[in-house]
Image (cartoon, grey):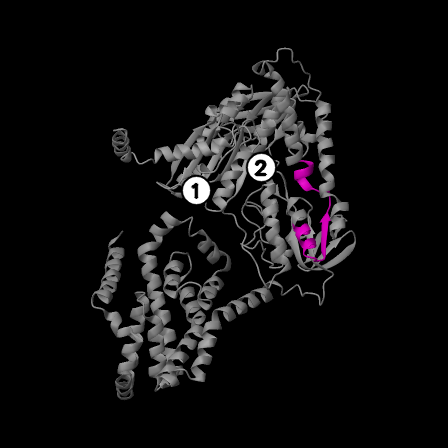
Amino acid sequence: MNKKQLVLLLLFLTVLSCFFIFDLGDYLQLSFFQEQRDLLLDYKENNFTLVSLLYFFLYILITAFSLPAAALVTLVGGALFGFWWGLLLVSFASSIGATLAFLMARTILRDWVQGKFGKSLKPLNDGIKKDGIFYLFTLRLIPVFPFFLVNMLIALTPIRLRDFYWVSQLGMLVGTGLYVEVGVQLGMAESIPAVLSVGLIRVLVVLALFPWLAKWMIALLKKRKVYKEFPAPKKFDTNLVVIGAGSAGLVTSYIAALTKAKVVLIEKNLMGGDCLNTGCVPSKALIRSAGVSHLFSRAEEFGINTASYEIDFPAVMQRIKNVISKIAPHDSIERYTELGVECIQGEAKIISPFLVEVAGKQISTRSIVLATGASPFVPPIPGLADIDYVTSDSIWNLNSLPEKLLVVGGGPIGCELAQAFSRLGSEVTQVDIVSKPLPREDEIVSDYMLENFQQEGIKFLGEHQVLRFQKQAGLNQATLKKDENEITLEFDVALLAIGRKANIQGFGLEALGLETTEQGTIRVNDYLQTNFPNIYACGDVAGPYQFTHMAAHQAWYTSVNSLFAGFKKFKVDYSIVPWSTFTDPEVARVGLNEKDAKTKGIEYEVTTYQIDDLDRAIADSEDKGFVKVLTQPDKDKILGVTIVGYHASDLITEYVLAMKHGLGLKKIMSTIHIYPTLAESNKFVAGEWQKAHAPEWLYPWLEKFHHWRRK
């Protein structure tokens, strides 16, 4: 802290201390003013200029140092000076004082606070960056936060001083006027019945309603600005148009139809989206076949000595198609038509926020939900077009098992498919620029998976960058670089699994001016609205989590918020988000892991239970992995759980329920779990926590008590 900052801080603390030490607040009470009212009014009549100046500078002092008396002094201004002169004095004094408070906070705190709490302040910084002075104007007009708090918080953002001043002057004017008018009414009151005059009650009612009226007015201004070029039709063909029939779109349509709304669902490809056709369902079917193959290879562990098997890869792929076909009726046009959804096959194009075109037909709609999903990201690696490569979408078209498979990417998709193809007989090499697989997980999880992959024969090349692809003598090759060293690998097929990008192109979003994020997803607010309030987005196209279950979760909010807009809306709940990577062993997580907790500066305790001690896991020869729980220090409140083990994705559900409803480890420990099951591991980790927090001091006394009982 430099000298200037130190002087300002001492001045601020001195004024604040004097206010409380000398009980100056006693002189800034309504009762004190009522007692001295006649005296003050007489003195004001004879010394108008002096009283005005004293009042003006007193008000500046109170607001500059955030003293808890601004509202009362505003009332006094109205009572002393009347409406117009009181409004003039208060308006300028409050704005000048707020600006001084702004300057002090900026000088003393901004660099330190931005450095230490920059991530927490990001929404505020983003609000200023996105909406600029309109954001501050909204805060001033709608007193969601106390004005002194706005002064200090806005000072920590990049807003310009002159913008802060004039927006504060304008934004506080209406609210100031209402308070001054209340003061005028109080100043004219001669008795208690007079205080409750019709005029005062009317002003108080307006004052109470002002935040809602201001909020409505701001919303109306925003709406007019956004829809200026897009007039709404007098009536609509449908309540809701949903674009995309994946998990998000299907659930949105289902809920809309359930509430008897008229809904149109548009899909240009296959019903069920990625999850059914190229994602969750086929990958889990493949993993199951690979898992059976792996069990055959372990037959001797189970006392079976004559087991033999042969991988029929075309049959494996046919089984995957059969699984998809069996599930497909759940997501079919026929089913959703029966539910009351109008399903249209075709490519949608948004003409305006109220008009969607598909198959040569234009549909007017009150709301639109974008549920267009995401696609595998294909990086611009030199030579990629010359070699044989697949993505998580196209790998299901393989007719023969690749002898050598190169997997580029160490995330969940890359790990799941790398292990599955390895178990089916491919020689798998996995490459990533990070050092270990599953980099978002804790180090212990990444280490565990790396060791497990190496034992299964998967070659993981960490900290390697793919420089280029090429074909030499008909063979696919990849040139990799680590540090300054380059190596060349030969492969039959390369699987690119390095992330997914939102599908935001090709249906009119660019022309409409729909805002996107740095990550390439559609920008939405807490209600999943885009910058056009009647256009919503959910699922992979909106983020921030690209999970099927999250898409379904968001879909409830988009459906309800869009259908009942103007009456009720709900903020989407991201408080408890579970997910799993379906490798063997599975990796499941909910809430914080240690990596997240350290990044966010959250204190925690760790309790771990090793699954190799669990009876059912031993009986199934799946005694590997662990349950790791993060709790608040010295409390059983669960902050996060990571499970590595057999059926981890099922075991995690108990913790999801517990965290959602505020249940701690003590509640889990007191719950009866069936023996022998894998779920007992959840109870045992709670027991480990209890042992670590046992009252050790009590045991010697208990020993003496029991000794006495034996006499």
The residue singled out by tag 1 in the image is 664
- Residue type at the position of mark 1: Gly
Say which of 111 and 673 sits in front.
673
Q: Residue furthest front?
A: 711
Which of the two discs, 2 and 1, sits closer to the camera? 1
Question: Please, is residue 475 above or below residue 685 in the view?
Answer: above
Amino acid marked by disc 2: Gly
The question of residue 270 being in magenta is answered with: yes
Q: Secondary structure at mark 1?
A: loop
Residue 391: tell me if it is visible. Answer: no
Query: Is residue 103 among what the camera can see?
Result: yes
Residue at the disc numbered 2: 499
Dot 2 lies on which element? loop
- 3 vs 164: above or below: above
- Which image quarter: residue 148? bottom left
Residue stretch in magenta: 252-279
Residue 98: give x, y in percent of width and height: 36, 67
Q: Foreground residue, 384 or 106? A: 106
User: How would you rate the neighbour count of disc 1 (Cα within 10 Å): few for under 14, some for 14-19, many for 20 or more?
Assistant: some
Residue at left offset 64%, top offset 56%:
512
Label 2 to label 1: alpha-carbon separation:
35 Å
Is 469 contained in the magenta span? no
Position of residue 533 measured from the top left corner of the image (x, y, whole percent): 60, 59
Q: Earlier in the sequence, mark 2 or mark 1?
A: 2
Q: Residue at x 48, y 31 (%)?
A: 681
Q: Is residue 518 left or right of residue 198?
A: right
Residue at position x 72%, y 57% in the image? 262
